[in-house]
Image (cartoon, grey):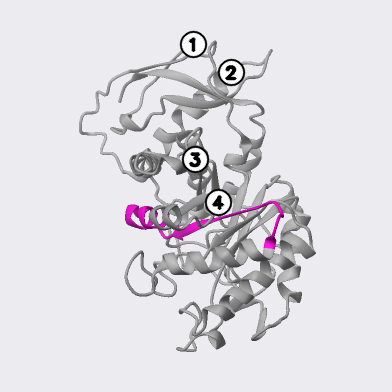
Amino acid sequence: MAINTLSKTSYRSVVNREMLISVMSGKSLFPLILLIVVLPLTLLAVKKVIDLRKGAAGTMANIVVDTQNPGSKVPSSLWRNLSQGGEEPADMIKPVITQIRALSPELIRVDHLFDYYNVYQGPGNYDFSRLDGVIDSILATGAKPMLSISYTPAQMTASNKNADPPRDWNEWYSLVKATARRYSVDKNISGIYYEVWNEPDLFGGWHYSGSNNYTTLYHQTARAIVDGAGRANYKIGGPAITAYYANWIKSLFKSTATSGIRLDFISWHKYSKNPADYLADFDNLNKILSDYPQYFDIERLITEVGPNPEPDSWYDGSQSGIHLMAVVTQLAGKIHRIFTFEPVDGPSPRSDKSSGWGLLTHDQKPKPRYFAIPFLNELKDGSLLPSTGDGT
């Protein structure tokens, strides 16, 4: 099936060579194929204002999609994941359980476990009641929790500041061990993802080498999780950095390969309006993995995804929904999971440009990006279809 379309944008290199569509017998594929083909082009046309007086002639595009030879299936686990930010020290999922359940999420990520929910009451003294409520709300949506093990309680640090290194690593070990035991053993929640920290390059002043070394934090935390969770079904990983930084990834691979400390997934965050930028990180990771073949099959997670890390009008408009679908088409078959940031806005608008990053406003009203996930969920038995062609 050939699809011809005219576009003045110069971003032809971003046109996907594989399209995510649903192979549904007896139904016309043309509207869906057309939508998926133009998603990246539409997104980037929004990103850049094109002066149509320059080179206005354009070139007719000739894009051919092979519907007869679908590629591998694309699991819905790629996009059915959410990451809730620490907008306020409250259970932000509870008021929107019904709306979130409708998205069929598989994992919901939360951070600020120890500085928001008053778990740590002193050495060996823990109160999980508030955190229990957050976990129960996640489970009520049908999802499993991803627990971002963060941040060090202020009373545990020499500086008396949250997220700084602990005075005594044994105290941190005991807190994390008790947390893993609480949820993986006592509450018997199977399939928890434990992510060591949230954005260590931003919170706590951690580094991939030298003082305040993240690998020390990872080793201490992972050891505590293993000892606390025992034989339960769970996964451990990190480093959940603010963006893909190769030195952090290499440092973690090297230290865990040498020490034998468990590492089930590698994670980072990505914010960009250009879906093609996400592929550059994937390509760089593959180069690193050539030096660490033991991690070649490791899960690759982008645990925060969005068009902009700063407040942006895109989050309140249709561009954000188009962006999410375009990112999915780019990363299908390359990344195991992406986590949309975030389910719910905070209580106050982030700026005069946007109410926040949420799929839902703080008063539970859905934004356009919310509806992108049900759309993707309708792509049952989604497959990658090869395509060829070019044009401007």
Per the rendering, the mark at residue 29 is 2
Secondary structure under tag 2 reads loop
**Label 4 – label 2 distance at C-alpha:** 27 Å
Q: What's under tag 1, amino acid-wise?
A: Met
- CB-based contact (under 8 Å), mark 2 and mark 1: yes
The reply to whether the C-beta atoms of the residues labelled 3 and 1 are less than 8 Å apart is no
Residue on which the image places disc 3: 335
Which amino acid type is shown beneath numbered disc 4? Thr
User: What residue appears at the point 73 percent right and 75 percent down from the top-left corner?
Assistant: 128
The numbered mark, 2 or 3, whose residue comes first in the sequence reads 2
Q: Viewer-nearest of labels 4 and 1?
A: 4
Residue drawn 55% across the image and 51% down it: 340
Chain-order first, disc 4 or disc 1: 1
- Looking at the image, tell me whether mark 3 or mark 1 is earlier in sequence order: 1
Query: In the rendering, which numbered label is found on residue 1?
Result: 1
Q: Taking 65 as reference, is 368 left or right?
A: right
Q: Nearer the viewer, residue 221 or 386?
A: 221
State the CA–CA distance, disc 2 to disc 3: 26 Å
Q: Tell me the residue that label 4 is attached to.
A: 340
Viewer can see residue 12: yes
Q: How many marks?
A: 4
Instruction: Give amino acid for label 3.
Output: Ile
